[in-house]
Image (cartoon, rainbow, N blue to C red):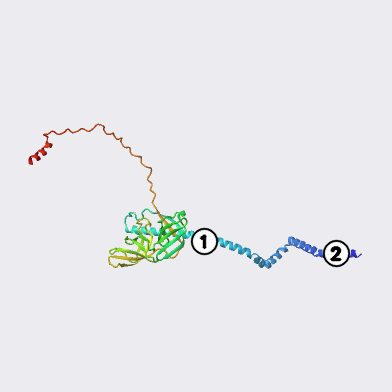
Amino acid sequence: MPYAGKKSNRLSESALTALPLIFLLGLSTALMVADQRLGYGSLVRQKFSILTEPFWWIASAPMRLFRGGRDEFALRSQLQADNQQRRKDLEIAIARIHQLKAVADENQRLRQLLGGTRGYSLNVQMVSILDIDLDPFRQRLVLDAGSDSGVVVGQALIDSGGVLGQVVEVGKNRSTALLVTDPDHAVPVQVARSGLRTIAYGTGQGDRLVLPNIPQSADVRRGDVLITSGIGGRFPAGFPVGTITGVQPDKLRLFVTADATPAAHLDRGNEVLLISNRAPVIDVGPPAPAARTPPQTPPSQTPPPQTPPSPVGSPTAAPETAAGAAQ
């Protein structure tokens, strides 16, 4: 009997445990039928969605932050790439504008252009600056391009302002350029207004060039723009070099010396342009056929005729006879 009582108690406990489940199943069935037949569920869901919206917004915040950061990073990378390309295009365009302006000034000064442009074609390569040395006795740039990138010694270096210098050392992946303000640097220049040709030397100061030994009769004044003359072939003609800031006579008062400010931005900028001259390609056509030369006749094998000896009484002996008679 005690065993039967324990078994009945367990069955009653199981029934009590199953009653809530049965109730919930019945309630769920009733709600589904009411939603299907009467449409009350949509109204209830709408009310509950308003209550649960803040919880849903908080739960989805990490995903929104992740997606926003990813999109922002991608957009930033794209904008940086576009900005880099636009900067390169702008540098090239400014360089071409400077060259065209110099050609326009020369056309205004001369009726016929006798080689002012010199047939140069602008070949440009943008490189980045790795290091800069502005010591008074050594002013140079280190570039991140070398012989593997096609850099050669003697290439001119410019930026959006004008001529920076020229390449003096080339390694495999790096190169060194001498700035126009270096004491060992000189560049042939021309006064854009008057056409006067001279040479601008570096002084070791980042904001000063010097033009010595200018004739006193030369037409040069403060504010004149200096451009490359193209003499020597190292720097293409027409690129800005600087602006004259002062003209004063030398100590002997035989010549005048001019000071100029460099046109290039020596103290700022991360990219520069390497330029080189390319001679224009001239179509000369196929080679002309070689001209036929007439065959040469072999020299005659017959000996030349010999002149017979003069007789004793000939006129050739008369001078000797006359000379003997005079003695």
- In the picture, the quarter occupied by the N terminus is bottom right
Q: Amino acid at mark 1?
A: Gln
- In the picture, the quarter occupied by the C terminus is top left
Q: Position of residue 302 (x, y in %)?
A: 24, 31
Q: Amino acid at mark 2?
A: Arg
Which residue is denoted by mark 2 in the rendering? 10
Q: Secondary structure at mark 1?
A: helix
Name above or below for residue 169 compared with residue 51.
Answer: above
322 displayed left or right of 161? left
Asked where in the image residue 181 lies, by quadrant, the reply is bottom left
288 displayed left or right of 11? left
Towards the viewer: 302 or 50: 302
Asked where in the image residue 41 lies, by quadrant, the reply is bottom right
Residue at the spot x=7%, y=39% of the render? 325
Density class for disc 1 (Cα within 10 Å; few <14, some 14-19, many ≥20) is few
Residue at the spot x=70%, y=64% of the render? 45
Which residue is denoted by mark 1 in the rendering? 80
Name above or below for residue 289 compared with residue 271.
Answer: above
Real-space CA distance between mark 2 and mark 1, rounded to the nearest whole angstrom: 75 Å
Density class for disc 2 (Cα within 10 Å; few <14, some 14-19, many ≥20) is few
Q: Position of residue 253 (x, y in %)?
A: 28, 67
